[in-house]
Image: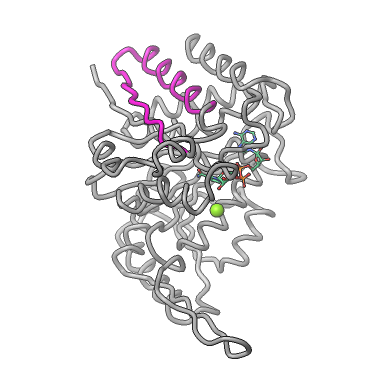
Amino acid sequence: MKKWSIASIPGDGVGKEVVPAGQKVLDTVAEVHGGLSFEFTSFPWSCEYYLQHGVMMPENGLDQLKDFDAIFLGAVGNLDLVPDHISLWGLLIKIRREFEQVINIRPAKQLKGVTSPLVNPKEFDLLVVRENSEGEYSSIGGRMNKGEDELAIQNAVFSRKASERAMRYAFDLAAKRRQHVTSATKSNGIVYSMPFWDDVFTDVSKDYPSIQTDSQHIDALAAFFVTQPERFDVIVASNLFGDILTDIGAAIMGSVGIAPAANINVNGAYPSMFEPVHGSAPDIFGKGIANPIGQIWTAKLMLDHLGEVELGEKLLDVIEETTTAGILTADIGGNYSTEQVTNDIINRLRSL
Ligand code: NAI
Ligand code: MG
């Protein structure tokens, strides 16, 4: 009997509604499989926790998390209680940084039964691998002068190590998918970092002769995400480019409520963290109508990461059966509750 120990951090707002839903689904996956189980340990770290303790997580919080097989997180942020820069940096971003979660992955796929805002979408199924540790989001730079001489400099940092790491991750994923990697570049406009990125991409691609590649400038690539998303398999991108592309990816799926994500530690020193793209959705919290699919699809990414790929595929099939049957929450045009959608997925898993 395999037992996965999972640290669960519901966090704030709808995180508290969708994380329990995700856990119930994972328990059902285990029950149906028979040979494995999940042991969840829940941590109350959140904005409410901050009001009581003055910190988003205890000083030894990372120590408490480091031996788990994975972290399953909902959302962080409650502007009525704590400013975002304190809540997000005190918990979410701290875990991502300290646990060296250097890669962020976000799939975007057209789920049957969910209306895309694209007028006539072909079936698309793509996966963005985003370098998550450096690039444009660096802390090197500064501001000086005042008045009309005021200026700011922000340096982008591209290392061979981090670029190559993200690219290899993308190639390895493509090898299990449709054998194609697209590199997001802008070497026609950014004359040092992007030609360097292109060189590393060319070098890495030599190690994967059976994978097809292409490079697209980010502006054209962003447009293709809207006009022809079906042409992509895996896309590898720098931190900023990946951030923008993944938001387009979530948008063309139909709702941020269904978009999943993972922050991956690749050196095995710390656990990876699985969290949906959406935030705490204060506007709908407490009504029982949050879409649980983002969190449940995120659970699928966690299954993949733990090596339970077949189970992950089954789970995604079942999610799609539920959407096809029209069991939808309000954000994607239905009037079912979080619980009804979750139970429908659970019942379908049980009858597999
Ligand atoms: P948000 O993602 O929470 O909400 C944006 C819109 O999407 C809202 O209309 C909301 O109702 C809807 N939505 C989000 N999740 C949904 C779900 N599961 N089902 C149905 N509809 C859903 O983004 P917003 O409003 O900008 O941020 C709210 C709080 O969440 C802020 O404190 C923000 O900092 C935080 N946040 C946290 C993130 C994280 O934990 N990774 C990511 C984004 C925002
Ligand atoms: Mg973003």
254 left or right of 68?
A: right
Residue 180 screen position, x and y as percent:
46, 53
* Residue drawn at 55 percent across, 84 percent down: 151
Magenta highlight on residue 153? no
Question: Residue 218 sits in which quadrant?
Answer: bottom right
| 89 vs 263, nearest the viewer | 89
- Residue 43 on the magenta span: yes
Q: How is the image coloured?
A: one colour
Q: In front here: 159 or 111?
A: 159
- The percent coordinates of residue 102 (x first, y second) are 35, 54
| Left or right, residue 225 beside residue 312 | right
- The quarter of the image holding the N terminus is top left
Is residue 254 positioned above or below 220 on the image? above
Q: Residue furthest bottom?
A: 149
Image coordinates of residue 82 in percent, x first then y, are 52, 46
- The part of the chain drawn in magenta is 17-46
> Could you tell me which residue is drawn at 22 percent across and 46 percent down?
269
Picture quadrant where residue 159 is located: bottom left
Residue at image coords 46%, 20%? 25
**Viewed as shown, does residue 290 lie left or right of 180?**
right
Q: Residue lying at the far right in this picture: please name it.
A: 119
Residue found 42% across the figure and 38% down from its top:
274
- For the image shown, how many numbered marks are present on the structure? 0
Whole-percent x and y of residue 244? 57, 58
Please state which of residues 337 and 197 is positioned toward the viewer in this rendering.
Answer: 337
Residue 125 position (above or below residue 318)? below
Q: Is residue 213 left or right of residue 255?
A: left
Q: Nearer the viewer, residue 144 or 293?
A: 144
